[in-house]
Amino acid sequence: MLLSSSDEDVLAAAEALGEDLNVAQSEATAAEFESLLIECNETISDEIGLEYGAVCDAGSDCC
């Protein structure tokens, strides 16, 4: 669980996710990639207990 991990572990996991998403984006259609991002955001929200949309200014299209 991310909340009990060290800062270094969290940063490493975020960096690995970013790299994986970069590869996925180059291999997927726009619709497939958008679906993947939505799934990732939901999983992150479930794990950390925060609504991702609320963190990045809900109501905007940033998420």
Image (cartoon, rainbow, N blue to C red):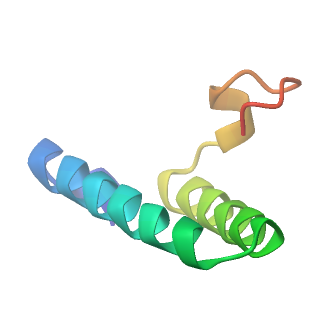
Q: Quadrant of residue 20?
A: bottom left
Identify which residue is drawn at 67% across, 71% down: 36
- Residue 48 lies left or right of residue 15; in this view the side is right
- The single residue placed furthest to the front in the displayed view is 26
Spot the residue most to the right: 59
Q: Position of residue 2 (x, y in %)?
A: 32, 58
Residues 20 and 11: in front is 20
Measured as percent of width and height from the top left, residue 14 is found at 32, 53
Q: Is residue 54 left or right of residue 17?
A: right
Q: Residue 43's spot in the image, x, y percent?
A: 59, 66
Residue at x-position 33% and y-position 66%: 1
User: Is 32 or 10 nearer to us in this picture?
Assistant: 32
Instruction: Judge left or right: residue 53 versus residue 31.
Output: left
**In which quadrant of the rendered view does residue 32 lie?**
bottom right
Q: How many marks?
A: 0
Dividing the picture into quadrants, the one containing residue 18 is bottom left
Name the residue located 44 percent from the left edge and 71 percent from the top edge. 23
* Quadrant of the image containing the C terminus: top right
Closer to us: 57 or 45: 57
Q: Position of residue 25 (x, y in %)?
A: 57, 66
10 up-or-down from 7: above or below? below
Is 23 situated above or below 51?
Answer: below
Identify the residue shown where x is 74% and y is 74%.
29
